[in-house]
Image (spheres, coloured by chain):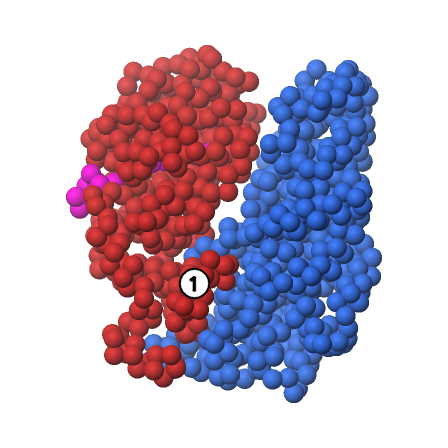
Chain colours: A red, B blue
Amino acid sequence: MKRRDFLTKSMLASGAFMLPAFLKPFEALAMNDITGHKNLVVIQLSGGNDGLNTIIPYCNDIYYQKRKNIGIKVPDVITLNDMQGLNPNLAALKELYDQGWMTIVNSVGYPNPDRSHFRSMDIWQTGSDSNQFLTTGWIGRYLDASRQTLKNPYTAMEVDDTLSLAMKGEYMKGIAVSDPNKLFQTTREPFFKDIVRDHEAQHLSEENLGYLYKTMIETYSSADYIQKTSKTYNVTAQYPTTGIGYQLKNVSKFINSGLETRVYYVSLGGFDTHAGQQGQQGRVLKTYADAVAAFVKDLKQTGKLDDTLIMTFSEFGRRVEENASAGTDHGTASNVFLFGGKLQKPGIFNDAPDLSDLENGDLKYKVDFRDVYANVLDKWLDVNNGEILGKQYQGLGLV
Amino acid sequence: MNNARQIKHLYSRAGFGIRFKELHDHENASVKKKLKELFKNSEADQHITVITENIDLRPKTDDPEVKKKNQEDRNQQDKDLNVAWLKQMASSDAQLRERMTLFWHNHFACNINNAYHQQQLNNIQRTYALGNFKSLLTAVSQSPAMLQFLNNQQNVKGHPNENFARELMELFTLGIGHYTEQDIKESARSFTGWHFDGKTSQYTFVPRIHDDGQKTFMGKTANFCGEDIVDIILSNKQTAIFICTKLYRYLVNDTPDKTNINQMADVFYQANYEIKPLLEYVFLSDWFYDDKNIGVIIKSPAQLLVSLTRQFYIDYHNPDVLLQFERTLGQVLFKPPNVAGWPGGRAWIDSSSLMYRIKIASTLLNAGVIDFTGKATPEDEAFLAATHKQQFNVIKRTQAVPDWGRFLQDIPLDMPRIQVAEFMLEPKLNQTVIDEVNQAPDIKSMVIQIASTPEYQLC
């Protein structure tokens, strides 16, 4: 097609001519294929959140013996049951807990734990064993498995500038969008617009060049769709003016505007508390809790809480005993939180961590994180967990 | 015969791309002659020496202020080392040596918080980049960086730590499935006593913690030391196959070709693991120049940055911007994600990283502007006006200065536009690119456009 012809035809078709015409059927198809649209929102706490000072085993003497300086004093703890309570900086979560919108899973980890941030984060994001190196993430493999029906990159969206390994599959990858307008603007570069046109026959081969063009065209079309769809909804609820507050507000906008996204991924850093832990962890926990509480209440208000599941994890917990700098070093098992309107077992899911039975000063894991994933995959994302996780996991009765 | 395409292909795989000058200096030179020149230019083994202090040797402290300062200095060293190498890759004449150093950097991936030891390991990988694989493997394994990263410092008689032994076989030599758990346990005992002296950063063997008992490894029983284990592993041809497979994917094509790889492994094994004859074999093979192998490998982020920097003689007044690019594109040198290194290939590409990639050329070369004189819709005009307005901010932030004079001077005046485009892109030009090239307002805009295409991501 000549440039002039292209211009004329596109302008005749509609004002929105940046979208190559052959992509339209894809989108129409995807719309019909999504049934019982449920959302998963993953919140990653980076740096290794100290689970013991998050959900405090305030009735356990060993906790106070090992943490003379940084233990959270009993009067400050927000009691949940007769064993555990919340760090006071998580006060905003108490209401969610009382409403039955929160589940706490204790002692989540994996065999032969790795104490390197990078490695352990990879293990959590790929769902691998600790001596196994996978190059695809668990959500990415979910995208691979669902690619017949959910063809678009925005099926999984990371609210960030770059895409985490968790979101990368072999055939499909999620999309990173920190700001829908910014992404839209970048893709509108007139030169880019020009080179992605009429490539259907030419380039969309299985070769790498075809793959690059395909990715570019998909990004193009996704940016357009995300921007156009999300701007139809205005979030009216109040969110804290923090990074994570802003990210979750965006997720609310995406969900409420009816974006066809199944998985959202958000991260919050600052949990690597080797020194002066109480102040530092307190600050980030408060930032986290205030944003999550605003998000959950917003979703309740808009009627989306029953269709949304929020999961929070960190790559590892920290040592039971404090170090000499009023901090804690890298450890093993920690807690996972779930929020949503349809939890099977709200409250505290399993026993508090056993502080008398340690391995080299670290907690022994009681729940494999892949059983949590398995449950989410089977019951929330409607895929067989064995297909995604490499082997069949039992799962838990969480959702 | 015009063999420009072959020579270009050779330079894109045996180096970080070709400059106009390099092609035209010896027009009609044979591939063989060019290869000889590449090896000749790579004889120099220029070490990186920018890191002069091992911060680990500073006195231990509990003072938070001092600790903070130490960490800041470490971060600065990380940056300095990273940028020094990136610049060396871009400017060095020893292109093949640097290109292979980058290969070994990923093969022997190491991520530790000590730039001094990282620099030492990088120099080892450079010294042996074209030498003997056994010497390379041994020197890497005995480097403080690797001894620390794979916990061999903690591998002592009676309390073996298997980390090094496992990675040695799984990632450095044989590949998974060619050894047993028992082989790992037994060989770990052989590597007890492989240590480094923290003060001098030199390898030292410590007999006192070495387990000198009998070990059974790969069916043989004796009082094996670490060197014996390395010999046994190398006597297994699987090691040659494993290395050649990785090298084939790095130099030839992402999709392994068993026949070609077996031929490579024969050469490598028979040459006693000498790397140079193996590379000569690859670069002189007919199949290396097959159409299906040209312009099909996705450049790694480091390669992309280096090739741009080299081709346009870019000078960075704010080197931080290079690290920023590495981070957004997903490859920070010296910080591989894990011992297995960066997976590479299509794993480099997702929606966001691809958009950044194709935006980087114009950011570095023209303050973010891709001049465009195609159809001018009001929307396009508004976009271009906005980016032009932003130019000053982009310049302030990137402070990257390409040497356009030098770049343009290299291009023969009478060279048709299409030939310039063909020269800059490895894949064959499609009609859209040809149209863009013909309609670009001027040669500079055209070149920026070419560097902003998906094709430019391939080598």
Does residue A326 appear in the picture of this structure? no
Task: Report the side of B296 relative to A233 (left or right).
Answer: right
The residue sitting at 36% across, 18% down in the picture is: A352
Q: Secondary structure at mark 1?
A: loop
The chain containing the residue under callout 1 comes to A
The residue sitting at 68% across, 37% down in the picture is: B238
Where in the figure is residue A251, as x and y percent of width and height? 30, 49
A302 falls in the magenta region: yes
Q: What residue is shown with label 1?
A: A204
Crowding at mark 1 (Cα within 10 Å: few <14, some 14-19, many 20+): some
A141 falls in the magenta region: no
In the image shown, does B28 or B339 lie closer to the viewer? B28
Where in the figure is residue B212, as x and y percent of width and height? 79, 17
Q: Quadrant of the N terminus of chain B?
A: bottom right
In the depicted structure, whether residue B269 falls above or below residue A216: above
Does residue B231 appear in the picture of this structure? yes
Task: Report the side of B86 relative to A302 (left or right).
Answer: right
The residue sitting at 57% across, 46% down in the picture is: B342
The residue sitting at 78% across, 39% down in the picture is: B134
Task: Report the side of B457 relative to B125 (left or right).
Answer: left
Q: Quadrant of the C terminus of chain B?
A: bottom right
Q: Amino acid at mark 1?
A: Leu
User: How many marks on residues?
Assistant: 1
Residue segment shown in magenta: A299-315
Where in the figure is residue B431, as x and y percent of width and height? 47, 76
In the image shown, does A58 or A75 lie closer to the viewer? A58
Q: Quadrant of residue B176?
A: top right
In the depicted structure, whether residue A363 falls above or below residue B404: above
In the image shown, does B10 or B144 lie closer to the viewer? B10
